[in-house]
Amino acid sequence: MAKPNNLSNNTHPLPRPLGERQVHPLGLGCMGMSEFYGQTDDAQSLATLHMAHGLGVNHFDTADAYGFGHNESLLGRFLHELSPSQRAQVTVATKFGIVREPGRYERRIDNSPAYIRQACDASLQRLGVERIDLYYCHRRDPAVPLEDLMGTLADLVRSGKIAAVGLSEVSAQSLRAAHALHPVAAVQSEYSLWERGAEQAVLPTAQALGIAFVAYSPLGRAFLTNQPPVVDALAPDDFRRVLPRFNGAEGEANRSLQQGLAQLAQSAGLPVSTLALAWMLNRHPHVLPIPGTRRSQHLQQNLAAAQATLPAEVMDALDALFAPGQVAGARYTETGWVGIEASATV
């Protein structure tokens, strides 16, 4: 099998559009720096944020629900340590709409205009910024008309509190309707080799409308790496312990897929995570993956994907291994589906 080329550390990957900005092809998802994946370490996370920035990453993704505001505050500490000129080159994305109680995974969705304004002000304060670069509706509440949701976000743009609007886990129909009401800069959905539902409608719709597609969990919550998680070894509060794709017969079936991926990565001479991210970047010029990590070694492996050009036979082998229907189990528990639009989950 032919090996990838263009892996020189001396080359700079071409930026990709995110609204009116140009960003590194790979962003950094910051959620795991605050919760969901076991014990966290702020000092380690801040060091990783600065390393990512030093390596050219200028797109950082957070949400008010991650750690109940802790993640935004952590990112705010990082931003405060940048110079004004450095901060001007960074795109900060955050989200509103998921409301949780401390210590609980269960959630409700709130898209009411009063809540959006309140949440935006709170995020601005925690981040320590005057304007949020990209503000997502984290999950959509169907009880709130799109006209009200987008109208409130348009008001925040006009007031200078946010620069651009994003939507997360919406259907292609909602994306089109929302974009007709006010420009949508980005749509965010889970997308990876092992979660390809977005290919049916949301991905092509975003491309047709000129909307950036931001892929969260592009490494399948670390399943598509050299060291896929072993459920019994995870921390008691790691939410992967309850996800169907990691457990039981589904988990066993998926581990065989991961082993096939590891063999392809070995043949290509790449870490598994590098290969998985390179597949996405090579296939979709409008997609912006935001893998999350707290560790410098993993960060460097992830960023190497932006400089890997995969031969057609490698791309074909990956597509065949992870063809739709091959992955076993749902990506969320019943609770996790709250707010995800049905036609975005196929």
Image: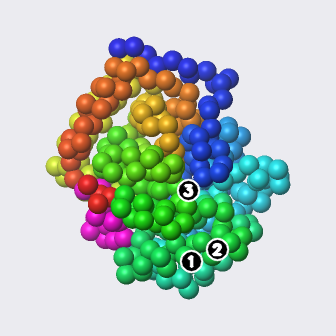
Label 2 crowd (10 A; few <14 / some 14-19 / many >=20):
many
The residue labelled by disc 3 is 185
Numbered range of the magenta stretch = 330-342
Name the residue at 62% across, 38% down: 15
Image: 90 above or below 169: above
**Kind of residue sitting beneath label 2:** Leu
Q: Is residue 129 visible?
A: yes
Instruction: Label 3, secondary structure: give it.
Output: loop
The residue nearer to you, when weighing 1 against 204, is 204
The residue labelled by disc 2 is 156
Gap between marks 1 and 2 measured at Cα = 6 Å
Cβ–Cβ under 8 Å for marks 1 and 2: yes
Q: Determine if the magenta segment contains residue 316.
A: no
Q: Is residue 242 visible?
A: no
Instruction: Label 2, secondary structure: give it.
Output: helix
Left or right, 176 with reference to 255 = right
Name the residue at 46% across, 56% down: 188
**Kind of residue sitting beneath label 1:** Thr
Image: 158 above or below 253: below
Instruction: Label 1, secondary structure: give it.
Output: helix
Dominant secondary structure (helix, strand or loop) of the stretch shown in magenta: loop
> In this figure, which colouring scheme has been used for the structure?
rainbow
Name the residue at 60% across, 72% down: 154
The residue labelled by disc 1 is 152
- Quadrant of residue 272 within the rendered picture: top left
Q: Answer with mark 3 or mark 1, whichever residue precedes in sequence.
A: 1
- The N terminus is located in which quarter? top left
